[in-house]
Image (cartoon, rainbow, N blue to C red):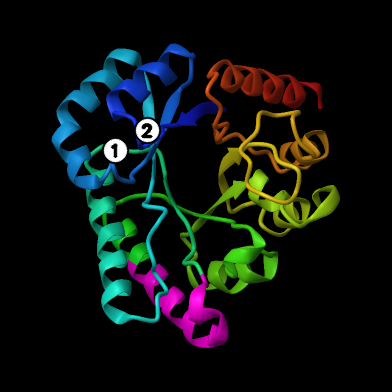
Amino acid sequence: MLYGAMNFPVNPVLEELEVIAGLGFDFMELSMDPPRAHYAQIRQLKTELLETLKRRQMQLVCHMPTFVSLADLTQSIRRASLNEVLDSLEAAAELKPLKVVVHPAYINGLGTFVVDLTRRYAMESLAAVAQKAWALGLTLCLENMFPHIGLGVEPDDFKKIFSDYQGLKMTLDIGHGNIGSPRGKRVIELIEAFPDRIAHLHISDNFGKRDDHLPIGSGSVRFPKILRALKKTGYDGTVTFEVFTADKEYLKLSREKFKNMWASF
């Protein structure tokens, strides 16, 4: 497997890359969000970024903008959000990433009162994103989310999506799957339902209430049970540790805990 960590887009991208490289990771998952990692800034950094990746013998996974409104009830906001993602895909393609991660559209605000309409907008945006990604030759991985997002949470949310989009893969976020699902039930159900679609992992711990992004072993996620189920599928892909702590050594600690657990099964 290949192991990576995500940049914090508040910090300069190249500085984040050097830190992650110094921790011995195989790739950086590039969160393409402002203020420091918007696609326009990434394009300006392209040459230096690619040179640093080559020098450090690292690769990239690209994560599309997080704080956009792909199912907003206002058409102009929805269109602007979609354009941000499409333009980010084009910039990502220039970097030759291993994979590209995208969140399903959020259902929030007044959209929660007209869920059918909001879901239709969400699916229209996903269709446009998927078509663009495949035209660019990118592997697109849709990430599972946590309950209050309203879409892309339970296995049933993904069944029709994966039926309609045969080339679409999944980013299994174990931390997200643990929220509101005691004893790892939802995560196991996702693994069992889509063993051939899981192409990327996000790893962090929490206590089942918030997306805390804690180091492995600091929360309630049942990693041994979950990783055992994953290993049975033959998973051998990319793993991003989304451990957001000031002390970066916890990234390394989580990676080693993961590797030790994986080897023990």
At a point 62% along the width and 22% down the height, the residue shown is 255
**Spot occupied by residue 47 in the image (x, y as percentages of width and height):** 15, 28
Establish if 239 lies above or below 63.
above
Looking at this view, name the residue that lies furthest to the right: 183
Element assignment for label 2: strand
SS majority, magenta: helix
Amino acid type, residue under disc 1 in the picture: Lys
| x 30%, y 66%: residue | 82
Which amino acid type is marked by label 2? Leu
Query: Could you classify mark 1 by the number of other residues whose Cα lies within 10 Å: few (under 14), some (14-19), or many (20 or more)?
Result: some
Residue 227 in percent (x, y) is at 75, 36
| Picture coordinates of residue 70, whole percent (x, y) | 39, 69
Q: In this rendering, would 129 be left or right of 119?
A: left
* Residue range of the region highlighted in magenta in the rendering: 107-128
Q: Are marks 2 and 1 in contact (CB under 8 Å)?
A: yes
Identify the disc placed on residue 130. Answer: none
Q: Is residue 16 left or right of residue 249?
A: left
Please give the residue where the numbered disc 1 appears in the rendered image.
96
Q: Secondary structure at mark 1?
A: loop
Q: Position of residue 238 (x, y in %)?
A: 53, 35
Q: Is residue 3 magenta?
A: no
Residue under label 2: 60
- Residue at image location 33% in from the left, 69% down from the top: 128
76 sits left or right of 24 in the view = left
| 116 part of magenta stretch | yes
The image quadrant of residue 250 is top right
The count of marks equals 2
